[in-house]
Amino acid sequence: MTQVQVWLGMLKPPPLSWRSLWTLILLVTIATLDLWLTPTLHVGVFLYPVAILTALWWGGERGVLYTTGIAFFLTIWEQWTQPMPSYSINSSIQYIRLVNHIASLLLLLLFGTACVYIARQQAIHQYAQESLTDLEAKLTSVVQLTPDALILASATGHIVFWNTGAEKMFGYNQEEALGQPLTLIIPPRYREAHMKGFQRLCETGESKVIGSTIELNGLRKNDNEFPLELSLATWHAKGARFFSAFVRDLTERKRHETRQAIQLAISQVLMESQTVEQAGRQILQSVGHLADWEVGLIWLLDSRRQTLRCAVVWEKSRKPELESFLRHSLATTFSPGVGLPGRVFAS
């Protein structure tokens, strides 16, 4: 917007309302009172500022300009209709009367200018407040709608902000999470190390994880752990220290990486083996370690009997409670449609 457009906007009359009509009535009343009391005292220079203040209240900068202009011309008209005020020291000294008139006009303009400045500052302050409110609303919307979790914590390690992404990721709603310690979402085996590191950070202000991205395990409300990516930051506000954490769920990414690693491991084993039986143990070992299995079995088809038999067994670590299960698996065969292996074979 150009300066000319700004001035044209200022010259536009203020909207007609009961407040503007009240100010106009006040101006006319002051002018009438001033004419009536002029033989003894000019009161307009003291009363017109009241009307200007009312314009500042309802009309802002434009209302003050119009009210000051009307008061200025009313003052000139009053002095023109009463050219010989009674308070003149000597009616023959014309310049004293002129000085009094000019001083009244200057005081009126000075007060009006001050009110214009106040109105302009009020408009700037209001615009800044509205912009800040609008920006806060936009940021709140972005923070609440982001799929990642945003968690803010105080220097005591308690949660002070919990967005919608955090609710979906960890399973706790805002009422359940606010005010709780951060250990709520940390697996038990990591809690002691977390509390020591957090205390050291608050005391010394030094940490290698602030400003960097790290991968950890989180704990959901249903006690399931999951891999996550964490970005930490810290700041001070009103003499207190706060911490923020952007958290991203890595479950799908880790699952995809594991699937690719398994496919590569199986391909390498099959390339080095002559038969599936030879490759079975190596395949189960590779897949079991990558997928974090406890036990794995390979069932092969006995073409002569048309049954499935357990050909290869792999254990991550020997556990007594699995011995009976594995012994029965090696001794059992399944016809099509019988048992889980048989139903898979039949399908």
Image: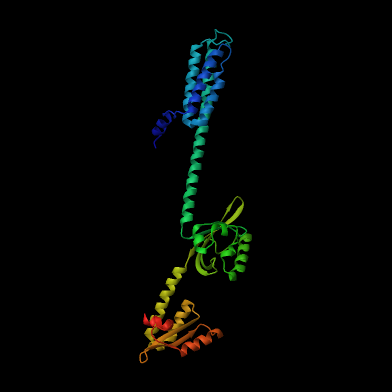
Q: Which residue shows up at 44% across the image and 74% down it?
A: 258
Residue at far left of view: 303
Q: Residue at x 47, y 23 (%)?
A: 69
Q: Nearer the viewer, residue 161 or 270?
A: 161
Q: Nearer the viewer, residue 37 or 319?
A: 319
Q: Is residue 203 left or right of residue 140?
A: right
Q: Is residue 336 left or right of residue 193?
A: left
Residue 238 vertical placement versus 345 (above, below): above
Q: How many marks?
A: 0
Query: Would you say 48 lies left or right of 341 here?
Result: right
State whether residue 212 appears in this view.
Answer: no
Relative to 229, is 136 above or below?
above
What is the quadrant of the C terminus in the image? bottom left
Colouring method of the image: rainbow
13 over 297 or under it: above or below: above
Of 339 and 153, nearer the camera is 339
Q: Residue at x 56, y 21 (%)?
A: 47
The residue positioned 49% from the left and 59% from the top of the image is: 165
Residue lying at the far top of the rendered structure? 92
Q: In which quarter of the view is residue 184 placed?
A: bottom right
Q: Residue furthest front?
A: 338
Residue closest to the eye, 235 or 227: 227
Expressed as whole percent of the image width and height from the top left, the position of residue 116 reads: 50, 30
In percent of width and height, residue 198 lies at 61, 63
Residue at the outermost bottom position: 304
* Residue 333 in view of the camera: yes
State which quarter of the image contains the N terminus. Answer: top left
Q: Position of residue 189 (x, y in %)?
A: 59, 71
Percent across and percent down for residue 274 are 37, 89
Horizontal arrangement in the rendering, residue 52 relative to residue 157 (left or right):
left
